[in-house]
Image (cartoon, rainbow, N blue to C red):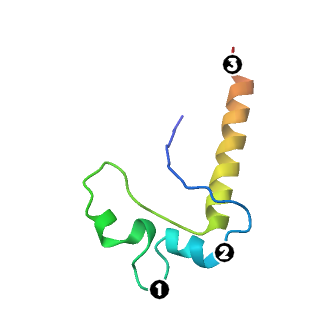
């Protein structure tokens, strides 16, 4: 089994696309979010990737379905 971890920012429904683009560092100027130079210079074991809200939504839904299936198949329960 391969388990990956990720970090993401959730914003309220209806957040303007320009704000989402800025948070993703896709403001056209390279000033925002995870693509800004200061973030790229951080020495961490993570890799900032970014992507569209739609791509992130697909990741969240796919992981939710995967872990729900695994919990059911392995009879994992929260007490």
Residue placed under numbered mark 3 in the picture: 78
Decide: marks 2, 1 in contact (CB < 8 A)?
A: no
Q: Answer whether labels 3 and 2 touch (C-beta < 8 Å).
A: no
Q: Earlier in the sequence, mark 3 or mark 2?
A: 2
Q: Is residue 29 above or below residue 51?
A: below
* Left or right of residue 58: residue 50: left
Specify the label residue 8 is tagged with. Answer: none
Q: Nearer the viewer, residue 17 or 78?
A: 17
At x 50% / y 48%, what residue is drawn? 6
Residue 26: x and y in percent read: 49, 77
N-terminal of the pair, mark 1 or mark 3, is 1
Q: Which residue is mark 1?
A: 28
Dot 2, crowdedness within 10 Å: few (<14), some or many (≥20)? few
Q: CA distance from mark 2 to mark 1?
A: 16 Å
Q: For the residue labelled by badge 3, is the local secondary structure a helix, a strand or a loop? A: loop
**Quarter holding the N terminus?**
top right
Please tell me which residue is depicted at 38% across the width and 57% down the height of the picture: 47
């Amino acid at each position: 089994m391969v388990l990956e971890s990720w970090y993401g920012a959730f914003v309220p429904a209806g957040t303007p696309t320009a704000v989402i683009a800025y948070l993703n560092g896709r403001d056209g100027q390279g000033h925002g979010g995870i693509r800004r130079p200061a973030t790229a210079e951080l020495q961490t074991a993570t890799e900032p990737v970014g992507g569209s809200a739609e791509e992130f939504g697909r990741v969240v839904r796919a992981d939710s379905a995967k872990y729900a299936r695994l919990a059911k198949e392995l009879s994992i329960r929260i007490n």
